[in-house]
Image: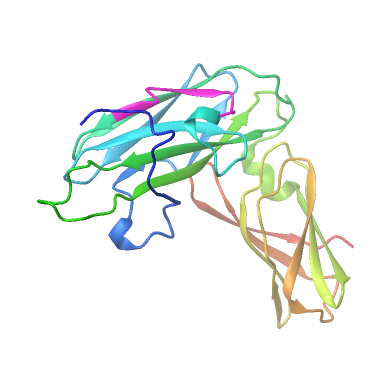
Amino acid sequence: MTIRALSGFIPFILTGTLLLSPAVMASVVMLNTRVIYPADAQSQTLQFTNSDNIPYVMQIWSDINDPESMPDNANAPFMTVPALFRIEPHTGQSVRLVFTGKDLPKDRESIFYLNSVQVPPKNMAPGNRNHMSVILRNRVKIFYRPKSIKGSPDDVPQQIHFSLEEEGGRWVLVANNTSGYYASIISASVVSGTHNIPFKVNMIPPKTTVRWPSAKSGKAIPSAGKVKFTLINDYGGQTQAQADLDK
């Protein structure tokens, strides 16, 4: 099978991995669910594993924040070595991610996205049977981490301050991330007595305030209520935390 650049001839791309049906689940996976890139590192090693019985061609690139990006318009300050390779059945492949240099903030993390595309062989269908090649695309976050950020990533839960407001008959949870790190929050709810109000959350950039609406209408919640929330840590695991509501 000849290795060719993917740009311009991809027949179909299915983005993501967690939402794929078992029939099209990615066979080549990266061992990490996120990449932490220390600013003083010369490179970071990414490890890919092919658990299937057939080979695949992989192409990797990074972007700033464009889910529709392709290798020919990749705009993040990173390069991968190799960027295009064949991975044999039941083998692994190491890839180096290298920062190519850019003037980025020194007091906070910057975020980029790593794309990897898995291309199956063209001769998978026996005889002359028609078949559709499904090319799987996966995106993971790259956190570029300057050495001069104050504090530790482990301190992030204590550096998020919450307050509750009512807006249009619904509660809004205001979250202020005072740290220099991204807070990857996947769930949050305000709990007080028998009240438990969940909120639609997302990632909080460093030194940023966000507002999360509730799916429920507003109800009286004492100021003594607490916020229980869950974050994703550097290793892809979940960290449970709680904080008092600011008065």
Q: Nearer the viewer, residue 91 or 137?
A: 137
Q: Left or right: 6 with respect to 240?
A: left
Would residue 245 be counted in the magenta stretch? no
Q: Left or right: 2 with respect to 59?
A: left
Residue 212, quarter of the rendered image:
bottom right
Q: Position of residue 15 (x, y in %)?
A: 46, 50
Q: Compared with residue 47, is residue 213 higher up or lower down, i.e. above or below?
A: below
Q: Left or right: 72 with respect to 225?
A: left
Q: The magenta stretch spans which residues?
A: 74-85
Residue 218, quarter of the rendered image:
bottom right
Would residue 82 be counted in the magenta stretch? yes
Q: Nearer the viewer, residue 155 or 235?
A: 235
Q: For the point 48% across and 31% down, which residue is it? A: 71
Q: Is residue 164 visible?
A: yes
Q: Is residue 191 visible?
A: no
Residue 199, quarter of the rendered image:
bottom right
Q: Compared with residue 100, is residue 157 higher up or lower down, i.e. above or below?
A: below
Q: For the point 79% across and 45% down, which residue is it? A: 208
